[in-house]
Image: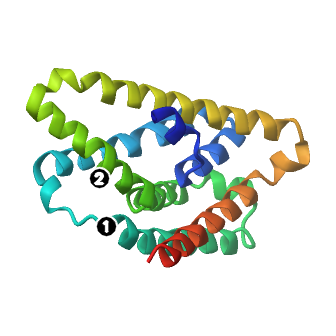
Amino acid sequence: MGIVGGLIPSPLHMIALTQVALNRWLRAILILLGPPLVIDGALLVVTFFFYQYVPHNIAHNVAYVGGVVLIGFASYALLEMRRKTEEEMASSAALTYASVSVASMAELTAPGTWIYWLTVAGPVVAEGRQYGYWHVIPFFAGGLVGYYGAAIFSTWLMAWGASLHKRFKDRLFLAANVLLLIMGVSYLVRAYLGR
C-alpha cells in the first residue's frame, strides 16, 4: 500500500521535482520525507486517541479545502512565472518554504490521506490495541519504507524522463505548476461528484 501512495503524484512530488531540476537532490529528498512524516505522525496521534470522534465524511469535506489551496497556490506560482525566470522562482528560498507549506496543507487535506487513516490505519491501530502494538508495527514500518522508497524512486524517474528531452526539462517548473492546478481541480470535481 505504501508503494502505491508513493507512486501517486502529489504536490510534494511536484515541488521535489523542481528541486531535482536544479540539481538539489538533498532538498528534494527532505521535501519528500519531512512533511509526510509530520503529517502521518499527527494523523497517527489523532487516530490513536480520537478515532471514534472523527467524522467519516471528513475526506469529502477536506477535498474542497485541498482543491482551493492547490488551485490558489498553482495560480500564484504561474502568475509569478511571468515576472521571474523559472530558475529564480525555483531557487527562491521563501517561495520554496511557502510552496512546501502549501503542499503539506494540500497533502493533509487530500481525500486519500483521510480515507487511508479512517478505513485502513484506524482499524489496524484498533487491532494493535487488542493484540498488542508489536503485532501492527510491521504494517506501518512496511508502509513507510514502501511509501518513501516509491516517492523518491518516482521523483527520480520523472527527473530522468525530463532529462531525456531538454525542452521539457527547461519547462519542468511550468509543468509541475500546471499539474498542481489540475490536481486542485480534480480534488474539487471528486468532492462535488462524491456528494
Q: Are marks 2 and 1 in contact (CB under 8 Å)?
A: yes
Residue 95 visible from this viewpoint: yes
Q: For label 2, count other residues whose C-alpha is less than 10 Å away and answer few (under 14), some (14-19) or many (20+).
A: many
Q: Earlier in the sequence, mark 2 or mark 1?
A: 1
Residue 41 visible from this viewpoint: no
The quarter of the picture where the C terminus appears is bottom left
**Residue 56 sits in which quadrant?**
bottom left
Q: Is residue 100 left or right of residue 178?
A: left
Q: Is residue 145 left or right of residue 93?
A: left
In the image, which disc is placed on residue 118? 2
**Residue 107 sits in which quadrant?**
bottom left
Is 122 rendered above or below residue 29? below
Q: CA distance from mark 2 to mark 1?
A: 9 Å
Residue 119, position as x, y percentages in the image: 32, 50
For label 1, the SS is: helix
Disc 1: which residue: 58
Q: Nearer the viewer, residue 67 or 73?
A: 67
The amino acid sitting under disc 2 is Leu
Q: For label 1, count other residues whose C-alpha is less than 10 Å away and answer few (under 14), some (14-19) or many (20+).
A: some
Residue located 37% across and 48% down the image: 116
For label 2, the SS is: helix
Q: Is residue 144 left or right of residue 165?
A: left
Q: Nearer the viewer, residue 163 or 124?
A: 124
